[in-house]
Amino acid sequence: MHDTDSADYRWTDAQLDRHIARALSDVSLAIPRERTADIATSSGDRDLSVASLSGLLVIEAIEYPVDEFPPAYIGFSQWDTTVTLHIDTAPDGSDARLYYTASHTLDGSTSTVPVQYEDVLATGASAFAALEYSAYAADTLNTGGDDVGKDFGAWGRAWMTAFRELLRRHARDRRVRAKRLFTPA
């Protein structure tokens, strides 16, 4: 992004962190983490709390009881952090296995974004940063000329278009699998 003047950066660390977080949110929605969690049921209670599932986006399936072959996927409903199992017999306290998608995390030392998607994240963060700067530059005196704001705007829109297309392509690639998880009785 050619922001190399350490005495006068275009973007502060806080601004860049905000743009990265926004792009990370979009990446998480299009290309989420696929997770599983075993949650103990309560004897006689069809409700499970999913409040402990960090970054939960969507519960895709629930297996109950676990480790049967073929797997016993059951119907369920969710309201806020409570999932209700749609089964005839109330649970006995054994585990239910949840298959869910979750948001990615990124900080100074760890990242859950797969390496092949890091460029997608960088493209999105760059687009958000350029668009913000184009709005800022529109009303300032620019030593780069009258078109600095327009140039950053055009650059940001081009990168945003590329970012959205990358998200669509990668999200489409993830959908090439069967989702028939259970057959109601």
Image (cartoon, grey):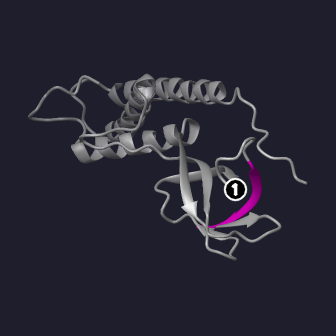
Residue appearing at x 29%, y 44% in the figure: 107
Position of 167 with respect to 3 (left or right) is: right
- Residue 129 colored in magenta in the image: no
Q: Position of residue 98 (x, y in %)?
A: 61, 53
Q: Position of residue 15 (x, y in %)?
A: 29, 45
Residue appearing at x 40%, y 27% in the figure: 118
Instruction: Give the quarter of the figure containing the C terminus.
Output: bottom right
Give the main secondary structure, helix, strand or loop, of the magenta stretch: strand
For residue 106, what is the image quadrant?
Answer: top left
Name the one closer to the observer, 34 or 156.
Answer: 34
The total number of labels drawn is: 1
Position of 114 with respect to 50 (left or right) is: left
Residue at mark 1:
64
Give the magenta-colored segment's residue range: 72-82
Residue appearing at x 74%, y 50% in the figure: 73
Name the one closer to the observer, 13 or 34.
Answer: 34
For residue 143, what is the image quadrant?
Answer: top left
Position of 46 with respect to 153 (left or right) is: right
Look at label 1 and name its amino acid.
Answer: Tyr
Crowd class of label 1 (few under 14; some 14 to 19; many from 20; radius 10 Å) = many
Instruction: Give the quarter of the figure containing the N terminus.
Output: top left
